Image (cartoon, helix red, strand yellow):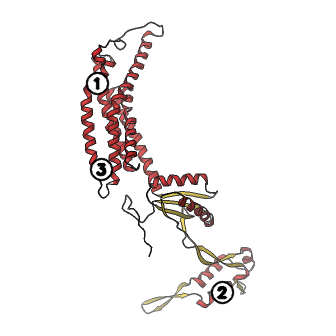
Amino acid sequence: MKVQTVQVSFFGGAGEAPLQVIVGATKLEDAMQYANKLLGFFKEVPGTLAPEVSVEEGSPEIKVDIDRQRMAELGLNIQTVGATMQTAFSGNNNAKYRDGAYEYDINILMDDFDRKNIDDVSQVGFVNPAGELIRLEQFARIYQTTGPSLLERKDRAASVTVKSFVLGRPSGTIGAEIQAKMAESPPPPGVTISYEGDLKNQSEGFGSLLIAMAAALLFMYLIMVALYDNWIYPLVVMFSIPVAMVGALLAMALTMQTLDIFAMLGMIMLIGLVAKNAILLVDFANQMKAEGHHYKEALILAGRTRLRPILMTTIAMVAGMLPIALAKGAGAEWKNALAWALVGGLTSSMLLTLVVIPAVYAIVDRIGLLFTRRKGNGGTGTNVEDSNSKVEVLDSELIA
């Protein structure tokens, strides 16, 4: 009896090893040689459990190497030789015995005492068109060797799978270390490498999620461009996303969570959630500027007025996520990373957006004033004042 204890995967199965590397080659010997080397890499990386190769050598077999030129000189062809040997050792049931309404197969093959060893195989006879009896040893080399216990093929090529379970470390981290060792000692020409299990799922899943994240950023920016009727101020809002990502990664690191698919989904959710803090500030500052306030005064008024709604909405969302982040029930570990990513991202956004967004807004507004002045003086060096370039003096109470 062979007993194994493995973790249940996301999809409920527990039989498949999370780490699977498929080594393919035209010749099975080449694939086996690099697979055994790869097995050594698996054993060197901490966290692998019971690494093994799917194809094991050691099954005894008799191999026949046919000299085709000699076979043709004796008047035989490969079809005749193959069919005769198949009948001799595997049997042929083409003939049928009919008894009334019933039909039975007649299996024709050599007796056991005629196919026990190499000598018996070498004495298999073939009759050529001239009626001569030809022995197999006259045109073939027969010898005993060992062969694989299992034959695998992938993409119509011989393949060997090196697989392992994991213990105590994320499968993605272990897979990255194994791939680094493979990069130091790449496979020889003619040997191909492909991945299955968690390595393949993570590669495909993270690629799709990164595309989704990029699409989310693009769509959010375009919607804000349409709403603001401006290409610059949406960029100011977008600066709230990096500070949220920093908080999400920091929270996951402090709580020892892995960056899995669910954590990536949480980060995609953050893109829409954290932008509302910056939108509150930028929108109110734009309203104050439209009423004639200087951009500095507008930013201070926006910070004072929008601080309470930013705190209320962010604290409410963080409080709603804490039960999921702290859950310890069955299957809760799959959703802990998502919740901690949201908690960390929302918290850092709440604290840093009030500092970063006004600073970026001020820089952008100054650059806008500079371009307005250059456009207004037409390059002649004359200072032209307009409503956007007036410098207002703020009283001491407002500055405080």
Q: Is residue 139 left or right of residue 171?
A: right
Whether pointer 1 and pointer 2 mark residues with C-beta atoms closer than 8 Å, the reply is no
Nearer to us in this view, 216 or 94 = 216
Residue drawn where x is 42% and y is 47% of the image: 208
Q: Secondary structure at mark 1?
A: helix
Reading the image, the residue beneath label 3 is: 326
Tell me residue 235's x, y (percent): 39, 29
Reading the image, the residue beneath label 2 is: 120
Q: Is residue 340 above or below residue 364?
A: below
Q: Secondary structure at mark 2?
A: helix
Residue drawn where x is 58% and y is 57% of the image: 192
Whether pointer 1 and pointer 3 mark residues with C-beta atoms closer than 8 Å, the reply is no
Nearer to us in this view, 73 or 288 = 288
Residue drawn where x is 59% and y is 89% of the image: 112
Which of marks 2 and 1 precedes in the sequence?
2
Q: Quadrant of residue 123?
A: bottom right
Amino acid type at mark 3: Leu
Image quadrant holding the N terminus, namely bottom left
Tag in front: 3 or 2 = 3
Q: Quadrant of residue 317?
A: top left
Q: Which mark is residue 15?
A: none
| Mark 3 crowd level (few <14, some 14–19, many ≥20, 10 Å Cα) | some
Which of marks 2 and 3 precedes in the sequence?
2
Reading the image, the residue beneath label 1 is: 302
Count of numbered marks: 3
